[in-house]
Amino acid sequence: MSPSPAQRAEALRRQIDEAGKAYYERDEQLIPDADYDRLVRELEALEQAHPELVQADSPTQRVGGKASSRFAEVRHAVPMLSLGNAFSDDEVQDFVRRIGERLRRDALFFSAEPKLDGLAISLRYEDGRFVQGATRGDGSTGEDVSANLRQIKVIPHTLQGSGWPQVLEVRGEVYMARADFEAYNADARLHEGKVLANPRNAAAGSLRQLDPKLSARRKLSFYAYGTGEVQGGELPPTHSATLAQLKAWGFPVSELCQVVEGSDGLLAYYRDIGERRDGLAFDIDGVVYKLDDRAGQEQMGFVSRAPRWAIAHKFPAQEQTTTVEAIEIQIGRTGAATPVARLHPVAVAGVIVSNATLHNADQIERLDVRVGDTVIVRRAGDVIPEVVSVIAERRPAGTSAWRMPTECPVCGSEIVREEGAAAWRCSGELSCPAQRKEAIAHFASRRAMDIDGLGGKYIETLVDAGIVRGVADLYRLTRDQLLQLKLVLDAESPQALASQIGLHLPPEGSGQYLRDVLALDAGDEGWRARALSLPAAFEWNTKKIATKWADNLIAAIDASRTTTLERLLFALGIEHVGESTAKALAIWFGDLELIRHLPWPLFKRVPDIGGEVAHSLGHFFEQPGNQEAIDALLQVGQVRISDTHPPSAKLRDGLDFAQLLVEAEIPGITRLRAEKLTAMLPDAASVLDAEPVQLVAAGLPNEVALGVAEWLDSNGNGPMLLKADDYRRTLLERAPEASAQAAGPLDGQTVVLTGTLSQMTRDEAKERLEALGAKVAGSVSKKTSFVVAGTDAGSKLTKANELGVEVWDEERLVAFLAR
Ligand code: IVH
């Protein structure tokens, strides 16, 4: 049975009160603004139809919330009212018609203004000085937030110019610009602070912050849109002139305010601002129309909570509630794993939304979004819809917190979290279809395999056509395929393609064929890829086009087959492995076959490779798909590395088992403890065999021993350590003893670098000098062979001169290295 009007009114009042209290008194949003408006309108309509239901304390009879008791109360001499709302053109026309009829006027002029989404404020000036500022509160009593308002830079402390009334109350909106809001939230995320749902809440929260210093840290702005009490002076006779006067006295007034005529003028203004809405620096939720002349305003008067001479014309709501049906992850072109909420479809600002981004796993944790939850989604302009908050009261029973899956939904590789970062990513760089285009483009780029002429759009189409699935496929491209690619990319339409090059269509109804195969009507750009993958029935007449490009490209692909280890490592696109890391890996290990099988802790033997990079290398090579891609490159692609060499002799330093234990990041294992342990348990096999008691016997504290045992048992760490120990021995076997290595030109020499180098970094210089056998030291002594001094060299240069040590400038170093 449907409820009686009295029951319904009661229920509405309760809901509105609850939401209003939360919103105005605790800066908390229980339901989207649009839902709140709907409830109020329903209650208004109900009370109009059944006047006996109107109660003095009904939400329709007052404005907003009550003043919160933390601040002193301020009584508004002129009440701060609210505005009626219009949601359609009809309602705007009705509004204009009502005024025209009552004032018996044909031409009506309005001040049309943006409706800022912030907090209404009244600023009181006496003799031109700011004396008090207050919130709206319930419309007649607000809160004294003067101290916080003084922190807002654009609010004048003293008025400019002259001619102001002795008492002047200026009314307007305090708001937070979007950029300031984003910056505020970015900072909150970084420092574990409270992330705020929207700029309105941010502005309200800041203004009602008891400590003005805290409030000052959040950047608030203000626009004036009207006046309150005025004594001892006169204001201009129209609203627009008053705004101009306020501006002259030093108040910010929105540039978007305009005087327009009649409902046509108002509606045109509405559309114009609607189109500009997303580009504005601040949030607006509609526009406000005010009859411009004050005499007319006075004649129109007020209804209970709003003036009859003004109305707010709302934009479609950008927030709606819906439920979360699933949380899935999406893998981006660079491998970033982004959680996405699959939603029960809902219309938000005129568009059906069924997916919303959750940004990252931390965001999910912060919001605690769960499958089954009712959430508020927001869609602003072209921005991807996002989940703003969860309505906790509507959570069904039996839900559980969401966890990031461990496998990539696209390629099955491991999803890894970057240390200390909020980002998660798929580690299947080379093998993940989601990352394919990006990976191939990087592989072919100039500083990687340098396949000159193979730009992004070519790769895109080749991948879409299914001709290139992985990097190795680049080495299988034929000249014919490239010619076809060029034709397809240069053609403006499928028809143009067909006619332009005499594409020999299959006999049976070629028009039909074109339509079916190329899906002409699909209206997308995908026809290019479809054309490129046409079955053999199509004969391409490629004779007419220039072939130089294809020849050059084939030559570039061929040339890239013979490459250096450094380039190939960089080309693989391993997260965190840039050119200099690739170079260091090549110098230190010398061999791809070795590198691709090394357990991650051994990468840390290379100076400058820390845990993060070592883990990333380990994850990459652990993915079968990546290994397959490398195999394909070497076998199918016949890629050859020209500079394979034995590992560097320097690897031998510190390559003992104790150091391996330290570098494996085993909880509680310091160098000292590792040494004690290895004195009794000299290799990985014996550590793995040991019971915790034996670990204790070897000198580990109890908890550490238990921690080590637990670590060995988890995440495949035990087998990894065994393998790492094996490879440690392999490295020792393969790396020549320092003396056995062919004498480098700088063997036995100690070099010191100082000052700034312009042609390379100090690290690069160090690496290159070391590669030639030099020891690079940090301080100058009599034993120093020579000092390389860049610009602004300081004390080390002075010392070298004092000691008579040879000094090289950068030019000499570069010339030497070039030799
Ligand atoms: S005029 C008597 N002008 O909207 C007229 N209000 O729903 C009172 N607002 O409380 C308000 N921009 O917080 C007016 N250009 C504008 C406005 C504006 C935003 C807010 C203000 C007010 C609410 C009314």
Image: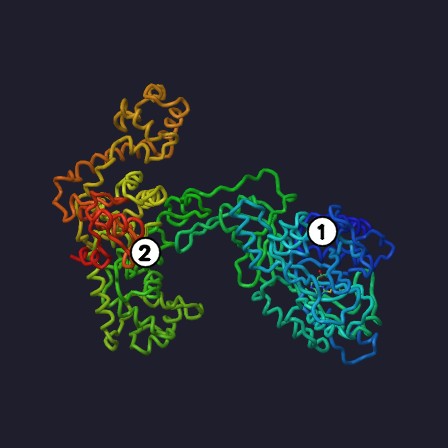
- Mark yes or no: residue 90 visible: no
Q: Is residue 808 left or right of residue 507?
A: left
Q: Secondary structure at mark 1?
A: helix
* Label 2 crowd bin: few (<14), some (14–19), many (20+), radius 10 Å: few
Q: Is residue 205 left or right of residue 805?
A: right
* Label 1 crowd bin: few (<14), some (14–19), many (20+), radius 10 Å: many
Q: Earlier in the sequence, mark 1 or mark 2?
A: 1
Inspect the image, locate mark 1, and give the three-letter code of the amino acid beneath it.
Answer: Tyr
Q: Quadrant of residue 756?
A: bottom left
Residue that badge 1 annotates: 24
- At 18% from the left and 48% from the top, the residue drawn is 772
Q: Nearer the viewer, residue 101 or 144?
A: 144
The residue furthest front is: 802
| Residue 493 % position (x, y) | 38, 74
| Residue 211 % position (x, y) | 66, 47
- Mark yes or no: residue 552 visible: yes
